[in-house]
Image (cartoon, rainbow, N blue to C red):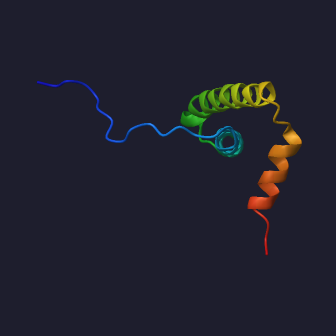
Amino acid sequence: MYDGFQKDDLPIDKTEEEKKVELIRSVLKSKKELDLAIKNFETAEMGLVDYYVYQIKASKSKLDFLVGKARKIGISLNMIEELYFRTNQVS
């Protein structure tokens, strides 16, 4: 008999700073997903246009939600951009 999904790991409490970093990473990842969906839409074959339109709308909604959440806790776009450039800086 199936008892449902069971998690193996117990949840670990994160500090506020860790939560902010995770949120910033989610924003950056969502932005990359949106950029990729737009790029794919621009080169899509006729049968995939609707699929990429859906992906663009979904990615945009997710990004808008995450940016709104970041603003509520005081994270500005400048902070996100700074982290992006620091983590992707070429040495």
| Residue extending furthest toward the bottom | 91
Q: Is residue 30 above or below residue 82?
A: above
**Image quarter in which the N terminus is found:** top left
All told, the count of numbered labels is 0
**Relative to 33, is 85 on the left or the right?**
right
Nearest the viewer among 78 and 55 is: 78
Q: At which x and y percent is residue 7?
A: 33, 36
Point out residue 8 in the picture as x, y percentages from the top left corner: 31, 41
- Evaluate whether residue 67 shows in this view: yes
| Residue in the image at 77% along x and 28% along y | 73
Judged left or right of residue 47, residue 81 is right
Quadrant of the rendered structure where residue 34 is?
top right
Toward the viewer: 43 or 3? 3
Residue name at image x 88 percent, y 43 percent: 78
**Position of residue 28 measured from the top left corner of the image (x, y, whole percent):** 71, 45
Q: 38 or 48, which lies in front?
A: 38
Q: Where residue 36 appears, x then y in whole percent? A: 66, 46
Q: What residue is drawn where x is 81% and y is 36%?
A: 75
Q: In which quarter of the image is the C terminus?
A: bottom right
The residue sitting at the left extreme is 1
User: What residue is at 84 percent from the left and 52 percent from the top?
Assistant: 82
Relative to residue 87, is residue 79 depicted above or below?
above
Residue 88, by quadrant, is: bottom right
Evaluate whether residue 42 shows in this view.
Answer: no
Task: Find the residue positioned furthest to the right.
Answer: 78
80 w.r.t. 89: above or below = above
